[in-house]
Image (tube, helix red, strand yellow):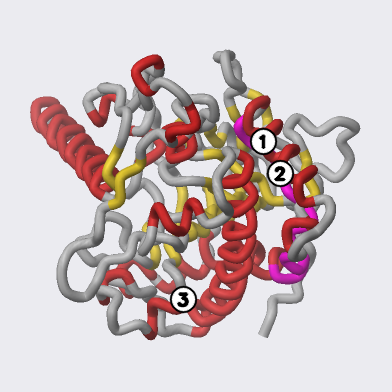
Amino acid sequence: MRVTAARLSTQPEQIDEWPVPVIDIAPLTWENHSDRAKVVAALSAAVLSHGIFAVVGHGIPDDVMQWALLSTKVALQEGGSADIEGWAELLPQPSVVVPPGFVPAYSQNYGRFGTDGPKEPPESIHKYTVYPPSWDFDPSVRKSRRNVWPDTAAGEALREPLETYFDEAQRVSHVLHGALSEAVGQPMELISKMLMPHTEGLMRAMCYHPAHPTMAGHKDFGTTTLLLADAPGLEFQPRGREDWVAAAAPQGALLVIIGEFFELWTQGVWRATPHRVAGAGDQGRCSLVFCSNQGIHYPEDGSPVNRTIRPLPAFGDEEAWGGLETSRTLGGAARHSIEWPAFFNDAMAAVRSKVATEEIAAARHNAAGA
C-alpha cells in the first residue's frame, strides 16, 4: 500500500530563472519524434555549459516519486524505522565494496575521501543501497549482489516504493544514454555495447541528519547520476570556476550529473561535474540517487568482466589532452583510460585503507591522552 501522507516538496516552487538548464525529454520517449534532434542538441549544450541539467517530461509518475521519497524519509530519517528496529543489526553486511541494504550514518565517507581538500567531517547520512530488483531472481548473479530487506513491516513498506522507482529511473537512464551517445556523434547503443554486461544502475536512498555537515565535493564514477531530493542542498562547480552554485530545479524534475566516463570518452570536452551537498537544514534532507552503470554485474562463479573506457577516435589527439584527474586517494595521477570495474574497486579499496589509517591514528591519539 502506498504512503498517503502529506506531499513532499522536491525543490522551491517558484524561481524566475533556474540555475541549471531545464530540458523536456518527452520527445526522446517516442520513436522517430521530429524534435529528437533538438533535444539532443539541448543536452549537448547543457553539458558543455554546466555539466549538470534538469529533465522534465521523463514520464515517471509524480505519485511514484513522492511515494519513494516519503517512504525513504519514514525509514531513514534520524529516529525513523531503521533506528527504531535496529536495521544495522538485522541486516548483516557482506564483505563487498558496496553492500546492498542499510548502511548507518558515519560508517561511509566516500564523498569525503573523494576530494583533495581539507578533511571533512564524517557523513551523517543513513543510506540504503538497492541493486536491480531483477537480480534477486537471477541465479547467474552473485548472491552478495542481490538485495536484502528487513523482514519487518517497515522493511516491506520501503521495498515496494524503492523497487518501483528504481525501474522507472533505469528506464529514464536508458533514454538519456541513447540521446547523450548521439550528442557525442555515436550510435544510440554506444553505452550498452561498450559497458556490457554492466548496463544497469544502482540506487542509494539517503537521509541526511538535520543540521549536520553533509557530503564533500566530488565527481561521480560512471556515465550519469539521476537525482531526486525533497529539499535543496545540492551545489555544483561550474566549469572553469572555483565557486559553488545551488542546483535548484522545477517540481518533479530530475537533476542529471555527468560522470567520468563521458570525460574520458570526449577527452575532456565534456567534464565530470564536481558537486556536493552543502547543508541539510533543520529538517534534514532525503534523496534518491540513481548511479547509472554502477550496478556492476558479478557472476556467481568468477570475477566481473572488465571493460576499457578510453577516448573515442572522433575527439582528436589523445596526447593533447591532460587526462582524467584522480584524487590523491588514487595517487593523483591523470588517466587516459581506465578498466571498469577494476578502477572502481581500486578506488573503494583505497578509501577503506584511508579510513582504517585514520581510525588507527585516532585510537593512538585517544590512548595517548588517556
Extent of the magenta region: 51-64
Residue at left 41%, top 20%? Answer: 317
C-beta proximity under 8 Å, tags 1 and 2: yes
* Nearest to N terminus: mark 3 or mark 2: 2
- Residue 59 location, quadrant: bottom right
Q: Is residue 132 left or right of residue 330?
A: right
Looking at the figure, which quarter contains the C terminus?
top left
Q: Is residue 316 magenta?
A: no
Q: Where residue 114 sits: x, y (%)?
A: 36, 32
Camera-near label (1 vs 3) is 1
Residue 7 shows in this picture: yes
**N-terminal-most mark, 1 or 3:** 1
Tag 2: Cα neighbours inside 10 Å, few (<14), some, or many (≥20)? Answer: many
Q: Which mark is residue 133?
A: 3
For label 2, the residue is: 40
Residue shown at the point (42%, 67%) measured from the top left:
131
Name the residue nearer the viewer: 237 or 9.
Answer: 237
Three-letter code for the amino acid on which mark 2 is drawn: Val
Q: Is residue 62 within the magenta segment?
A: yes
Q: Secondary structure at mark 3?
A: helix
Q: Quadrant of residue 325?
A: top left
Q: Amino acid at mark 1?
A: Ser
